[in-house]
Amino acid sequence: MYQRKFASLFVVFLSVAFSSAGCSYTKQPGAKEAESDVGGTGDVRYTHEPLGSNKHLLTVTAAPGLMETEGSIAQRVHIFANRFAAKTCPASFEFVHDPNFDQTIAGGFMKRTKSYVFYCKG
């Protein structure tokens, strides 16, 4: 009797744990950068939203590679943002500097996310 009760409580616990572990307040990344895998495990995904007046919102999400450091993840995210902005704005671009620009990378379950706003010059 106790085993059956324990088993049912365990199943309820697992279902609650798994359903709440997937919560995220960021938009699901829509595109994956080609060949962005690190050691076959981590990748870079992004969403891009044109804001008008040559401004763009870029949200970059990186999945950590096996045994990858936080510094390495931050570098991959920043390098990707620079490359993406350069491709989007062939002449020149600049990141918008606001009080939140030095935000830390938002950590999540097996992902790190950072948002950038940039505008095209010329």
Image (cartoon, rainbow, N blue to C red):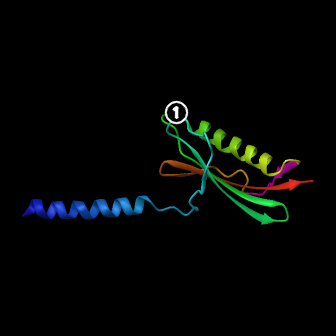
Residue at 66% over, 39% down: 75
Residue at 77% over, 65% down: 51
Residue at 60% over, 57% down: 30
Relative to the observer, which residue lies in front, 102 or 47?
47
Q: In this view, does 69 lie to the left or right of 85?
A: left
Look at the numbered disc 1 and give the secondary structure of its residue.
loop
Residue 25 position, x and y percent, is: 55, 64
Q: Is residue 73 magenta?
A: no
Amino acid type indicated by mark 1:
Gly
Residue 68 position, x and y percent, is: 53, 35
Residue 39 position, x and y percent, is: 52, 33
Above or below, 2 relative to 107: below
Q: In which quarter of the image is residue 35?
A: top right
Residue 100 position, x and y percent, is: 72, 57
Part of the protein shown in magenta: 92-99
Q: Mark 1 points at which residue?
A: 39
Above or below, 38 relative to 11: above
Relative to the observer, which residue lies in front, 95 or 36?
36
Residue placed furthest toward the left: 1
Task: Say few, some or many: other residues with alpha carbon within 10 Å of mark 1 (under 14 / 14 to 19 / 20 or more).
Answer: few
Above or below, 69 relative to 15: above
Q: In this view, does 121 lie to the left or right of 116?
A: right
Relative to the observer, which residue lies in front, 45 or 69?
45
Residue at 48% over, 35% down: 66
Q: In this view, does 59 lie to the left or right of 38?
A: right
Relative to the observer, which residue lies in front, 100 or 32?
32
Above or below, 33 relative to 20: above
- The quadrant of the picture occupied by the N terminus is bottom left
Q: In which quarter of the image is residue 63?
A: top right
